[in-house]
Image: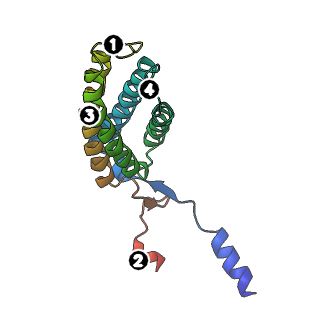
Amino acid sequence: MPLAIVWSAFMAEPEKILEHPNRETAASKSTRAIVIALLLISAFLVAVITVGGWDVLTGGRNLQIVYVAIYLLLAYYVSQWRSGMLPLTAALAAILLIFAAVAAPAWFARDADGFTDPMLSAGLLGLLTAVLIPVQLLLIAFAMRGFSQQWHVEVERMPDGSTRSASAWA
């Protein structure tokens, strides 16, 4: 009989409404939009650099294609308020920042006689790679700002408007 009482009490519990108050602020919404925009800009720049330098890129093609795919996937998840993707975004941006900082001078060095010409000029590819550096710095900063805004916090509300505190679960 005690099991039936527990079961009926469980079934009689009113429907709960989960709210995410930190997602409603203007700062959170703008941070999310900026992170998504920076991810899409980064994916576009990497795609243009990959396609434009396809003939001369040897070992980096696959990694660049994976980066474009991952950045597009991260943009989707951030648009769904998945705050757990923000530290991953910052980490991948830091790695891409290092690659871009190393590759930009190499593209400018290819703008001389004796090198195979890529589809786009080496100077333009060097410029796009150099532009990728501040974009990644901004992406790291805004991803960490979004993570500190705690988008994951949930408040449980009952239909009558009352909230359930953390101590009610203990």
Give the numbered dot on residue 121: 1
Closer to the camera: disc 4 or disc 3?
Answer: 4
Query: Do we see residue 42 in this rendering?
Result: yes
Q: Amino acid at mark 4?
A: Leu
Give the numbered dot on residue 57: 4
Give the image location of residue 19, x and y in percent: 43, 53
Choose top left, top right, bottom left or bottom right for residue 13: bottom right
Closer to the camera: disc 2 or disc 3?
Answer: 3
Closer to the camera: disc 2 or disc 1?
Answer: 1
Q: Could you say whether the residue bearing mark 2 is in a helix, strand or loop?
A: helix
In the rendered structure, which disc, 3 or 1, sits on the residue that comes first in sequence? 1
Q: Amino acid at mark 1?
A: Ser
Number of residues whose C-alpha sits closer than 10 Å to that of mark 4, classed few (under 14), some (14–19) or many (20 or more):
some
Closer to the camera: disc 3 or disc 1?
Answer: 1
Q: Amino acid at mark 3?
A: Ile
Give the numbered dot on residue 133: 3
Mark 4 and 3 residues: CB-CB less than 8 Å, in contact?
no
Q: CA distance from mark 2 to mark 1?
A: 63 Å
Position of residue 69 relative to residue 90, above or below, is: above
Closer to the camera: disc 4 or disc 2?
Answer: 4
* Residue occupying the point 36% across, 49% down: 91
Give the image location of residue 101, x and y in percent: 26, 36
Q: Amino acid at mark 2?
A: Ser
* Residue occupying the point 42% across, 12% down: 119
Give the numbered dot on residue 167: 2
